[in-house]
Amino acid sequence: MTITQYKSKRKPTGGLRKKQRKKKKRDFGRDFIPVKIGKQKKKIIEGLANIKKQRLLQVDKANVFDKSTGKTQLAKILDVKENSANPHFVRMGIITKGAIIETEIGLAKVVSRPGQDGVVNAIKIEKK
């Protein structure tokens, strides 16, 4: 089934609208593909204007930026601790933007969009 971003096929009165044109590639949407913890797997998707996007399907490492030292380290992801997008994502181990992950270095907040960018960038959370 194709996901499209269109108006409703019905008028406010209940009648059917006439088709203006065929569906174009720019009108298509895509299903949500969750990024889970595991050995890194990527999928390449072709966008408009022959742009290639990298979608992550699984990831095991993240680029963690430490504010105190100003350096970035590649750290292994151990677990998902909190996810504001959906509380059930924690149980399933799904990583999205804004998720708090546990790494070898400590807790970190994901600032990139792994499903869109193809990489997990995070900022280390300082303990108070």
Image (cartoon, rainbow, N blue to C red):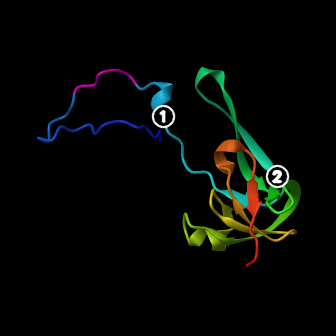
Residue 74 falls inside the magenta stretch: no
Residue at point 87% right, 60% down?
A: 69
Judging by the rendered image, the residue that carries numbered circle 1 is: 28
Disc 2 element:
loop
Quick check: 21 left or right of 80? left
Residue at point 14% right, 36% down?
A: 15
Where residue 51 appears, as percent x and y from the top left, is: 66, 26
Task: Give me the disc on residue 59.
Answer: none
Q: Observer-nearest residue: 53 or 112?
A: 112
Up-down relation of residue 4 to residue 106 (above or below) = above
Residue range of the region highlighted in magenta in the rendering: 18-22
Residue 21 falls inside the magenta stretch: yes
Q: CA distance from mark 2 to mark 1?
A: 27 Å
Quick check: 16 left or right of 57? left
Quick check: 59 left or right of 55? right
Up-down relation of residue 109 to residue 1 (above or below) = below
Up-down relation of residue 64 to residue 48 (above or below) = below
User: Quarter of the image containing the C terminus?
Assistant: bottom right
- Name the quadrant containing residue 49: top right
The type of residue carrying mark 2 is Gln
Task: Name the chief secondary structure element in magenta.
Answer: loop
Disc 1 element:
loop
Mark 1 neighbour density, 10 Å: few (under 14) some (14–19) many (20 or more): few
Q: Earlier in the sequence, mark 2 or mark 1?
A: 1
Judging by the rendered image, the residue that carries numbered circle 2 is: 40
Residue at point 79% right, 60% down?
A: 67
Where residue 70 appears, as percent x and y from the top left, is: 84, 55
The type of residue carrying mark 1 is Phe
Quick check: 18 left or right of 89? left
Where residue 21 appears, as percent x and y from the top left, is: 34, 20
Residue at point 65% right, 44% down?
A: 116
